[in-house]
Image: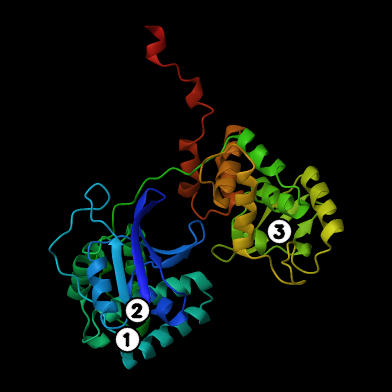
Amino acid sequence: MERIKITQSTYNQNTIVLFEFTENQQLIEELRSLIPNFKWEEDVKKWIAPYYTSIKKDLFKFTKGKYWLDYSGLAFNPNHFPEETKQETRILEPLTKEHILYLEKFKNYLLSKRYSGSTIKTYTETISTFLRFYAHIPISALTHSHLITFNNDYIIAKNLSASFQNQIVNSLKLFFRIIENKVMIVELLHRPRREKKLPNVLSKDEVKAILETPKNIKHKAMLSLIYACGLRRSELLNLTLKDIHSERNLLLIKQAKGKKDRVVPISAKLIALLRDYYKAWKPITWLFEGQIPNTKYSEKSLENVLKQSLAKTNITKKVSLHWLRHSYATHLLESGTDLRYIQELLGHSSSRTTEIYTHVSTKNIQQIRSPFDDL
């Protein structure tokens, strides 16, 4: 009998469960359907999931008679895990034929409206979870009271993330409007209080150390372009050779988040670096291509480029590619760039999103004198 081992750990300051098993696609798909946010985490080279109070019970029922569950590493120590509750959580049932039909209809609507692939995946997965929770009830019979029960008996009971709760609200609102032509008062499914987290920002010296480390000119060009133009990971990988307008010192970013185009300035120093890169690598279509010519560079490979660069510096922080974008915005603000221009450069729809960088800019904060110094 195949063995599944689960152990406790922490990752990014969150309590998680690590899974070890002999890889097989059927088991992976089954676990994805059973465990919320079950995913492969490249940093730890393991399948992981956030801890929730009934995860052991869910796995017991799932593995009974099919797999051997080794949970010896899942010690329910109150120093590591929240206290177990006696609240029962419902096991999700398989989707019915009606569910599958309506989900396919909903997915086709999202495709026709040109929603991004990641949004379609998120919406269909969250709707699927909700429908499996009410597998015995026809979709047409679902009401507001079912939303409240789902929120309390599944999302809250399993201690799922605030982001998952928000995704459920957004996806259910759209699903019932499109599929059932029914306006659900989703406000009854309470949204969690918004977490106020500040963006992670590197100092200019730290950015310089990261960008000067790569010996491979392609790696150096990729990391430099993310920071120098404040790009998202996907924006960098979707760039083509035609998007660089060197005669005007501009970079065109097409159909980024929110299906918006934008232009950002690109310096002569960076253009010179990109010319040297082009002479060495001769990309065909995409600015940065993978090992197979004329194919886009992969996201995982780009993340590995950053990890390799960090390993050669003295930086011990768990830096992600998005930190470079945050650092670009903060350094612009500290150098006196107007917040409205930074909003345009980053492609933010709302100025409120950009204003968060005023909370991490140290330009004015460092000038404040502590009353302690006057004692």
The residue under label 3 is 252
Name the mark nearer the viewer: 3 or 2. 2
**Relative to 346, does residue 186 appear above or below in the rendering?**
below
For the residue marked with disc 2, what is the amino acid? Ser
Q: Mark 1 packing: few (<14 Cα in 10 Å), some, or many (20+)?
A: some
Nearer-N-terminus badge (1/3): 1
In the picture as drawn, the residue positioned furthest to the left comes out as 86
- Residue 128's label in the rendered image is 2
Disc sitting over residue 293 in the figure: none
Q: Residue furthest bottom?
A: 97
Residue 174 can be seen, yes or no: no
Coordinates of residue 271 in the picture (x, y in percent): 80, 49
Q: Is residue 245 left or right of residue 300?
A: right
Check residue 95 in the rendering and tell me which mark sits there, or answer none.
Answer: 1
- Asked if residue 330 is positioned above or below residue 300 in the image, the reply reads above
Question: Amino acid under label 3?
Answer: Leu
Q: Are marks 1 and 3 in contact (CB under 8 Å)?
A: no
Q: Secondary structure at mark 3?
A: strand
Inspect the image, locate mark 1, and give the three-letter code of the amino acid beneath it: Leu
* Picture quarter with the N terminus: bottom left
| Closer to viewer: mark 1 or mark 3 | 1
Give the side of residue 373 with respect to residue 183, left or right: right
- The extreme top residue here reads 375
> Residue 240 at x, y = what percent?
74, 65
- Separation of residues labelled 1 and 3 (CA atoms): 44 Å
Which residue is at a point 31% across and 84% down the rendered structure image? 180
Residue at point 48%, 57% (across, down): 44
Mark 2 or 1 closer to N-term? 1
Q: Is residue 24 above or below residue 313?
A: below
* Comes first in the chain, label 3 or label 2: 2
From the viewer's perspective, is 43 left or right of 291?
A: left
